[in-house]
Image (spheres, helix red, strand yellow):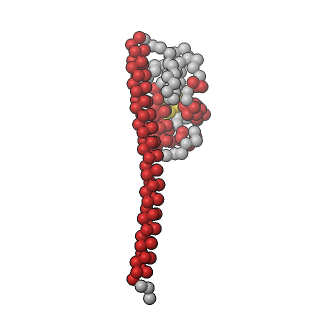
Amino acid sequence: MVSLPEELEVREAAARRRVEELQAEAAELALRLEAAREDLSRLEITRETVTKVLAELSAADADVESDGPAEPESHGVGAMMVPPWREGLAATVLPDVCRDIMEVVADAPGPLQAKQIVPRIGLPATTGKIEGTRAKLKRLVKRGWLDEDAPGRFSPARRDPGADRPESR
């Protein structure tokens, strides 16, 4: 039979171990919390910086547009824009994913939908990837690189020799 003082010592030792374990977990959580706070801080600073740069670029674009048309230029912000199509401009000026889309559409026997293009450019056929690709297709149509024959059905742009296409429809 175990005496009451011995039982209390056993329980006290178990409680002490539990306190030590919880203190170790709390220390680990404190480290993880600090790392998460640092990540959050970096993301907030990045977002603020990007917002400021984009606002400055928008203001500069507005100034350029008021002065008249100009050649598209790279702003060096990490996002490559799709330039409007013009005679002599090759698809090599497009971002990689847009070039891939152009190749798939050009190789197709007829108009394609975004959901048909996504797997052919190596993306998983998830709703997000399909919608992102659809947005790129719409941008390529707007800039004169592709035609949208029927809603959601895309094909290579038909061009009359020597005729410039409007930048938007």
Identify which residue is drawn at 55% across, 34% down: 97
Quarter of the figure that contains the N terminus: bottom left
Quarter of the figure that contains the C terminus: top left
Q: Measured from the top left, where is residue 162 in percent x and y?
A: 54, 14
Q: Measured from the top left, where is residue 136 in percent x and y?
A: 48, 33
Image-based side of 86 in relation to 18, left or right: right
69 lies above or below 151:
above
Q: Is residue 13 visible?
A: yes
25 lies above or below 14:
above
Q: Nearer the viewer, residue 16 or 64?
A: 16
Identify which residue is drawn at 40% across, 27% down: 52
Q: Nearer the viewer, residue 11 or 114?
A: 11
1 lies above or below 44:
below
92 lies above or below 70:
below
Quarter of the figure with residue 87? top right
Q: Residue furthest bottom?
A: 1
Q: Measured from the top left, where is residue 121 in percent x and y?
A: 57, 39
Q: Residue furthest top?
A: 67
